[in-house]
Image (cartoon, helix red, strand yellow):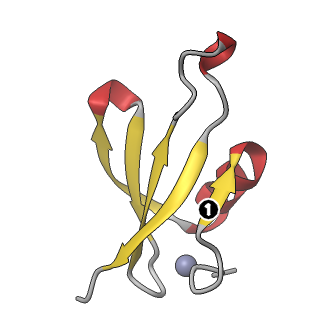
Amino acid sequence: MCLCNDLTELWDDEAKKYIEGHLRSIEVKSDGWEVVYDCPNTGFRWIEDYPRSEEQGGGPMRLRRLNKVVK
Ligand SMILES: [Zn+2]
């Protein structure tokens, strides 16, 4: 289900579920520590990163919404 118009940020398990169920990965950056996704319904882009990567285990995954890309 597409919630890209309402959501702006997700963390960890919620982020992973949303990615698996909905988003398409389009670009991997920074040795896999950043991944760009896109929503097939709305055209919103999302970026996965690890802002607290200095923590043990790499810290939580964050998924943030970026700008909409008009096709
Ligand atoms: Zn969506």
Residue labelled with disc 1:
9
Task: Identify the residue shown where x is 67% and y is 11%.
Answer: 56
Which corner quadrant holds the N terminus? bottom right
Which residue of the protein is positioned furthest toward the top in this rendering? Answer: 56
Residue nearer the viewer, 60 or 27: 60
Task: Identify the residue shown where x is 63% and y is 81%.
Answer: 2
Residue 61: image location, x then y, percent? 61, 39
Q: Quadrant of residue 70?
A: bottom left
Instruction: Name which residue type carries label 1.
Output: Glu
Residue neighbourhood size for the residue with mark 1, other residues' Cα within 10 Å, grouped as few (<14), some (14–19), many (≥20)? some
Q: Quadrant of residue 18?
A: bottom right
**Which element carries disc 1, helix, strand or loop?**
strand
Task: Identify the residue shown where x is 35% and y is 75%.
Answer: 67
Residue 51: image location, x then y, percent? 52, 34
Say above or below: 62 vs 44: above
Q: Is residue 55 left or right of residue 70?
A: right
Residue nearer the viewer, 53 or 12: 53
Which residue of the protein is positioned furthest toward the left in this rendering? Answer: 71
Which corner quadrant holds the C terminus? bottom left
Residue 24: image location, x then y, percent? 45, 62
Task: Identify the residue shown where x is 28% and y is 81%.
Answer: 69
